[in-house]
């Protein structure tokens, strides 16, 4: 496949990186193929399930519907970038402690959305959580535990 | 997705200049949520996309002018519009409608200009903006023009925009004492595309309806005004019979089609019921201040 190429440079999980990409490639593809990051994965490919969520300049984005070309100059965080070395983030800890997953396929998306929700609203009630996470699907049906995980993550973040 | 070329102009004027009135293979891309889906499913295979992401930042802003008109730049992400206090003051129905439009991630990226230019009859904001009497500022190679949102939609994924025209801004006129509501009925998941979307805006004079604007989407081939309903409401007392008459007029006027979200007969009934409910909801808001 030919097509126009572009060299993009961006910050990926805190490190400056560059890649030569086809301008028709989506961001999920480029994260996987160029950087070996498989935390964002394409499932529905239509913006419905949230498995491909990444943060672009701090904002949650559906990477399966994003052109990688638009990542040029951006600051991108994937699930691989939210732990501090060996220390997991509050959201990661909370999902593990509450058992808010079964197969784990949806979990990176849920954790990144949880992080953004708590950045915007440190104390969400059930309605706020369900509203915010309605664009993430868990086919294993771990929703009750996910609700608990989000609330536990909120507590952990407050405890610092 | 098949390869294509991408241009990233820095101004709206440059973007317009890169479009071509006679070549539909060249298309703008804004948030890209609709374009990407269409490319992935092969509905659309562009030769070249013109990204609007680099154009002047004033096209991503929301403001209110001295006359109280709300100006929304075409590149404003839906999520920014949802959070805008200016928009919530000027026309609170916009924020309420946005909360049930798709999901946070899509709203983070999708723009108002892309939403309107997409021309899908199921979109939520066209009926809302039609009921509010909004207009769009269009910029093309031969200059600017203003078009009422109600005149923008021509058919499935078809709009009144020429291939070399861009929506630059949407203006919602000051609503004064008018109040509006939007009701969306989904038949599958809660944040699915609607089977019916209906927006009603009423000017109330005490216990009487002054004037009404009513628009529906999703159930019809394009979002459109229901003028018989507006006539059934204008000058009438705020009473049960008025709501009933409005619902009946809506069901009679709207040309509905069966699809995966419901049969035509079912949607006709939805229209009758939701028109009534929408009018009732506005009555219950009481008078005083725009809602
Ligand atoms: C998972 C999912 C769920 C959704 N659910 C809903 C829903 O419940 N309700 C709803 O209303 N919508 C829904 N949508 C649709 C969504 O609102 C649209 O995809 C979005 O608003 C399009 O905006 P965009 O900026 O991404 O447009 P783009 O994809 O960039 O562009 C869309 C079209 O507009 C053209 N265009 C873009 N900007 C301009 C401009 N300024 N001037 C002229 N032409 C322009 C493009 O060429 C293209 O034809 C959903 C979308 C997804 C992916
Ligand atoms: S894979 Fe992107 S939203 Fe489902
Ligand atoms: S844990 Fe399996 S999809 Fe959510």
Image (cartoon, grey):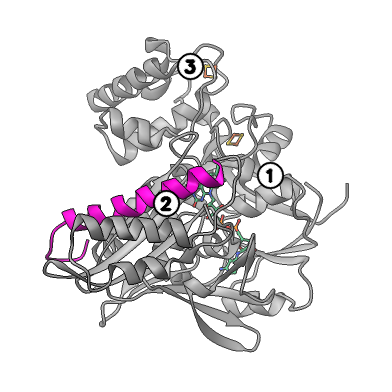
Please name the residue that numbered disc 3 is placed on.
A141
B192 relative to B241 in the view: left or right: right
- Circle 3/circle 1 CB separation < 8 Å: no
Q: Secondary structure at mark 3?
A: loop
Label 3 CB-ligand 3 distance < 8 A: yes
Q: For residue B92, which quarter of the picture?
A: bottom left
Q: Chain of mark 3?
A: A
The disc label shown at residue B271, or none: 2
Q: Which element is circle 2 on?
A: helix
Q: Is residue B267 left or right of residue B119?
A: left
Magenta-colored stretch includes residue A86: no
> Residue A71: where, in percent of width, then height?
61, 50
* Disc 3: CA contacts within 10 A as few (<14), some (14-19) or many (>=20): few
Judged left or right of residue B83, residue B187 is right
The answer to whether residue B237 is above or below residue B33 is below
Look at the magenta stretch and give its main secondary structure.
helix
Q: Chain of mark 2?
A: B
Using the image, tell me which numbered label, if any, was put on residue A110: none
Left-right relation of A150 to B9 = left
Residue B138 in the image: x percent, y percent? Answer: 54, 79
In front of the other: B13 or A9 = B13
For label 1, the SS is: loop
Residue range (magenta): B262-291
Magenta run includes residue B267? yes
Q: CA distance from mark 2 to mark 1?
A: 40 Å
Answer yes or no: is residue B66 visible: yes
């Amino acid at each position: 496949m030919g097509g126009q190429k572009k060299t993009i440079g961006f910050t990926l999980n805190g490190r400056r990186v560059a890649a030569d990409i086809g301008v028709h490639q989506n961001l999920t593809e480029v994260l996987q193929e160029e950087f070996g990051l498989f935390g964002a994965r394409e499932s529905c490919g239509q913006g419905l399930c949230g498995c491909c969520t990444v943060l672009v300049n701090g904002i949650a984005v559906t990477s399966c519907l994003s052109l990688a070309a638009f990542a040029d100059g951006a600051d991108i965080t994937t699930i691989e970038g939210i732990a501090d070395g060996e220390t997991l983030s509050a959201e990661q800890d909370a999902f593990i402690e509450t058992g808010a997953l079964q197969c784990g396929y949806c979990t990176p998306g849920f954790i990144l959305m949880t992080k953004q929700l708590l950045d915007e609203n440190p104390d969400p009630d059930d309605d706020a959580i369900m509203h915010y996470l309605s664009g993430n699907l868990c086919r294993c049906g771990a929703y009750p535990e996910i609700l608990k995980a989000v609330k536990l993550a909120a507590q952990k973040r407050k405890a610092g | 997705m098949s390869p294509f070329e991408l241009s990233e102009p820095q101004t709206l004027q440059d973007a317009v200049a890169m479009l071509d009135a006679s070549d539909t293979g060249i298309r703008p891309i804004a948030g890209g949520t609709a374009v990407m889906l269409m490319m992935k499913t092969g509905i659309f295979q562009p030769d070249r996309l013109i990204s609007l992401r680099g154009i002047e930042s004033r096209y991503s802003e929301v403001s209110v002018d001295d006359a109280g008109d709300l100006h929304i730049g075409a590149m404003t992400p839906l999520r920014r519009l949802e959070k805008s206090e200016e928009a919530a003051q000027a026309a609170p129905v916009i924020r309420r409608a946005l909360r049930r439009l798709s999901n946070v991630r899509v709203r983070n990226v999708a723009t108002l200009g892309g939403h309107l230019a997409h021309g899908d009859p199921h979109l939520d904001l066209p009926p809302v903006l039609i009921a509010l009497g909004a207009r769009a500022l269009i910029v093309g190679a031969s200059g600017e023009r203003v078009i009422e949102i109600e005149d923008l939609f021509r058919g499935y994924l078809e709009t009144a925009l020429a291939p070399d025209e861009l929506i630059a801004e949407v203006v919602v006129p000051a609503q004064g004492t008018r109040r509006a509501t939007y009701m969306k009925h989904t038949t599958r998941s809660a944040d699915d595309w609607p089977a019916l979307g209906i927006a009603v805006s009423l000017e109330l004079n005490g216990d009487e309806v002054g004037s009404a604007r009513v628009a529906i989407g999703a159930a019809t081939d394009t979002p459109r005004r229901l003028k018989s309903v507006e006539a059934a409401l204008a000058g009438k007392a705020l009473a049960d019979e008025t709501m009933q008459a409005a619902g009946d007029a809506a069901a009679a006027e709207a040309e509905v089609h069966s699809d995966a979200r419901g049969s035509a007969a079912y949607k006709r009934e939805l229209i009758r019921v939701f028109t009534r409910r929408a009018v009732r909801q506005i009555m219950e808001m009481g008078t005083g201040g725009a809602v």
